[in-house]
Each structure stands twice: as structure tokens, then as C-alpha cells.
Image (tube, rainbow, N blue to C red):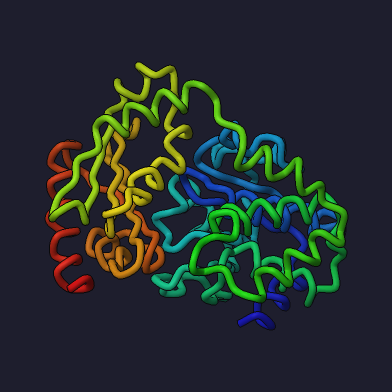
Amino acid sequence: MLTDAVSFLQSHDDILLIAHVSPDGDTLGSSFALFGALRAANKRVQVVCEDAVPALYAFLPFSENLVPPERARAAGAVVCVDCADLARTGRCETLFRAAKATLNIDHHGTNEGYADVNYVKASAATGELIYRLLTELRLPVGRDVAACLYAAISTDTGNFSYSNTTPDTFRITAELLDAGIDLPDLSRRLFRTTPFKKLRLQALVTEKTKLYEGGRIGVAFVTLDEIASCGAKAEDTEGIIDLIRDIDTVEIAVFLRESEDGAVRASLRGKTCGNVSKIATRYQGGGHRLAAGCTLNMPIAEAAETMLAAARRQLQEDCR
């Protein structure tokens, strides 16, 4: 798997990287790190995503290079980065299907290997896989690439607090520190900076959260109008699911938001026992045992009821 991915990147000189829709720190940090390293190796590289870089991650090195699929050049080699399935590529799927050679780099347990070459391995973050790739390729991990990898790994581990954090996670992070990253600055930007509009949205979600099954399930949803009423955007909903999960009694948390394409995006979190990836996969989504997501094509109130019913079934199955 790793050796095949190394061979893939060595044998192609015009490479297009795809980050998933509603991009988070892992898909962006991993994509930008790979972009920077491959460009330094004199390869032609593009980073493409259906959505723009959220303000939270706009400070990352190489972020200015991300383009929408409509502006991308067709490339013979396409790499999906942190995309659990092809649906996560959004409008970039056309670029993937047009490529002569495809590579899938991902750490999600629900990833079934949809590319020609698949480097899919359970890890704390896709950023860890990118680090291993760069090491095998013998490409230098300079300060900018290291900063991107730190963003990828730290955000997907909840600042090294989630159960997916391993000794290898800390070993890799130590190497990133050796590369000269500014840890206090990165931590402040990633975890200690909240725009007031997002704070208002968090307050609204907190007010709308409802508890079920003796407080073991927490559910909240927001409409596009409600997001706009806070002066916020869809990107400001990132991380809000954690507010619901962190309620002391909650085992399964559900957060839903309307999206501009008319669909409903559902974020799911488990605390100790609820395997939310099983919920997500029933609705063509995916993820990890304690963190997953899916898209529902129905009115948001109906979507909330659908996810509540699924959470109740999963609670009975996993959390007896």
C-alpha cells in the first residue's frame, strides 16, 4: 500500500490533489503539505476542492493555491486526500474519473478503496500517512510543510485528546517540532481563536440542542437562515458537534445543517460506545467509530428525526 503510493507519486509529474467537500484541517493540511513537498521536487501540482478554504485555515502555507474544480487543469494523475468515498470529492469527481491514474490516500475505516492505487490505513489522521509518504519519498519536511501536517494531525485528534491519538502520533509530531514549526502560534490560530459570529452560532445551537433517551442522545440542527442570522457561514459550523458530544450524559451526538445545494449535512459523534460510522454508512456516508458524517436529501426537520431514530437504534445496539 505505502510502497504502491510511493511508486505512484514517483512515476507521475503532473498531479492533481483533491480535498474533500466542507474541508477540515486534515484534508487541507494533508493536501497542502503534499502540494508543497511535490512542488519542491519540481512536479506540476494542483490542489482542488469544491469549497473555498475556511477562514480558520487561510493562514496555512500554500492555502492560496487551492482552486475550484472549474479552474483546474485536467491532469493524468489524480490523488484524493482524506476522502472516505468518491462522494466526498463533490464536483471534483469529474476530474477524478477523467484521470488515467488515480490514488486514494485516507485513514477512514469505511473507505473501500475506490482508486487504482489505495493507501488506506487506520491512523489518527491522513496527515500521518502523508508524513510517512514524504519520508519514504525522501522529500524534506521543511517548516511550511511541517506546519500543514501539524494542522492536519492536531485538528483530527482534537488537539491530541481523542482516542485515535497513538504513540506514533506524538513521534511524528516531535519530528514536526524539530522541523521548526511555531507551536504556540499554530495552537492559538487552530484552537484559541473564535470569531464572534461563530460564538453567536454556538450559542444558538446550544439553545436548540435537545436530549433524548435519558440524556444519552443529543441532537441539534440549524437552517441556512439561522446561520445567516448570526452573521455566520457554513464553515463556522465546524466543531459545533463537539459542544453536543461534550454534554456529560451524551453518548451519541447529532448535528445537522442545511446546505446551499438543498441537502442536509449530518455530523455524528460517539463518546465511548456508540459506533456512529454504522449510522453514517446506512445513509451513504462514512467515517470512524466515534466520528462520522453523511448527507441527507430531505427537509432538515425530517432529517433530524431520521438521525434520531438511527441514533436510538445504535444506542440500543452498542450502549447497553
Q: Is residue 111 above or below residue 43?
A: below
Q: Foreground residue, 256 or 182?
A: 182
Residue sitting at x 37%, y 45%: 241
Q: Quadrant of residue 265?
A: top left
Residue sitting at x 14%, y 60%: 312
Q: Quadrant of the C terminus?
A: bottom left
In the picture, measured across the screen, residue 210 lies left or right of residue 173, that is left
Q: Quadrant of the N terminus?
A: bottom right
In the picture, measured across the screen, residue 70 lies left or right of residue 269, that is right
Percent x, y of residue 36: 78, 52
Q: Foreground residue, 146 or 69?
A: 146
Q: Foreground residue, 99 or 133?
A: 133
Q: How many marks?
A: 0
Percent x, y of residue 284: 28, 60
Residue sitting at x 30%, y 47%: 266
Q: Is residue 272 above or below residue 51?
A: below
Residue sitting at x 64%, y 62%: 127
The answer to whether residue 157 shows anywhere in this view is yes
Q: Is residue 66 above or below residue 6?
A: above
In the picture, measured across the screen, residue 107 lies left or right of residue 318, that is right
Percent x, y of residue 280: 29, 60
Percent x, y of residue 116: 54, 74
The extreme front residue here reads 248
The answer to whether residue 71 shows anywhere in this view is no
